[in-house]
Image: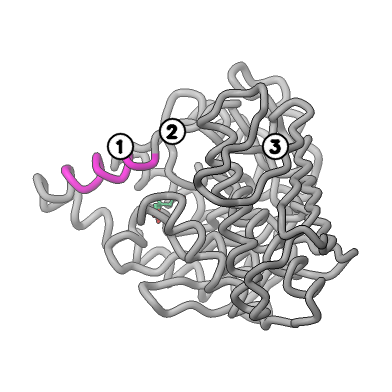
Amino acid sequence: MTVASAPGKVYLFGEHAVVYGEPAVPCAIERRARVTAEERGDGRLRVDADDLSLDGFTVTYSGGPEDRPDVDVPTGLVEAAMGYVSGAIEQAREAAAAPETGFDLTIESDIPLGAGLGSSAAVVVAAIDAATRELGVDLAPEEIADRAFRVEYEVQDGQAARADTFCSAMGGAVRVQDEDKRRLEGIPNLPFVVGYDGGAGDTGELVSGVRTLREEYGFAADTVSAIGDLVREGEAALEAGDVAEVGRLMDFNHGLLSALGVSSRSLDAMVWAARDADALGAKLTGAGGGGCIVALDETEGARTALRYTPGCEEAFRAELDREGVRAE
Ligand code: MEV
């Protein structure tokens, strides 16, 4: 039996602009998905995933398209979850040159699902690591990231960003720009607080809204490149350990995202609640339209304020996690 875990993430800077070749800085957070893998002799896949918001979700199936799991929950949800899990297992089988191997998998996660915190990437990264190590093969985090990206790319019909899987596999703060991805070193502690409105925006719609604005208005295109400039300043502030400056730039980044039309009433309310409670900075994280904000605050102020903010369903501390995928 082999256990692996991998973290979720927030965007410190640069979402949306990253689609147009600007850099972005996602950061791993101390909220993890854990996968236990045990080889089984009959080539089948049994998945136990109580935490995937599928009540009592346990299925056994061959993993083939003709063999649909028989469970009493909405099929779309199961197919999406199984797409990630069986994609991860396919990658592990290929990496270990063991195409017929079956597994018992148990998935546990403390990353809210569908909240833009990279829960699916964390599950896929941890599943690839647990299943390959169960077969005696140790993959480098970069290779796990690459294989996990292929799974997300397939399940999400080519809409996946490399940021989530790379950040989850490597941990810490990373910089992504087109094909170029690397971990940032010497980063200070980042006391993140996450506020979640219980919803999620439609990433495809939000990305296409920004595309339309950018094509229509020169100043919207300038706003996207201003985010790129801001990310470069943010990187310098991070590497200089200047957390106050990182916070100021987060505030600025939220303003620019808001100008591009991807904030929402609840996201703005949470951002302002955190700022009023003296957070060093606060912004939406991910595609926007709903979902999560991230604030920087080492006191309990922002989290307490968020808990009393109408529209905020959950507020929690989730500091920067310097570790990516790891054996448990
Ligand atoms: C969504 O998590 C991040 C976006 O930048 C989209 C993407 O990078 O694919 C909005």
Dots 3, 1 in contact, CB < 8 A: no
Which residue is pictured at 60% across the width and 42% down the height? 81
Q: Secondary structure at mark 1?
A: helix
Dots 1, 2 in contact, CB < 8 A: yes
Q: Quadrant of the C terminus?
A: bottom right
Residue identifier under label 1: 205
**Compared to 121, does 264 lie above or below?**
above
Nearest to viewer (mark 3 / mark 1):
3
Residue identifier under label 3: 52
Residue 306's label in the rendered image is none
Asked whether residue 206 is drawn in magenta, I would say yes
**Compared to 318, does 28 lie above or below?**
below
Residue 292 in view in this figure:
no
Q: Is mark 3 within 8 Å of ligand 1?
A: no
Percent x, y of residue 300: 81, 39
**Image-based side of 255 in relation to 46, left or right:** left
Q: Amino acid at mark 3?
A: Leu
Q: Secondary structure at mark 3?
A: loop
Q: Main secondary structure of the magenta part?
A: helix
Residue identifier under label 2: 201
In the image, which residues are magenta? 203-212
**Image-based side of 191 in relation to 178, left or right:** right
Q: Earlier in the sequence, mark 3 or mark 1?
A: 3
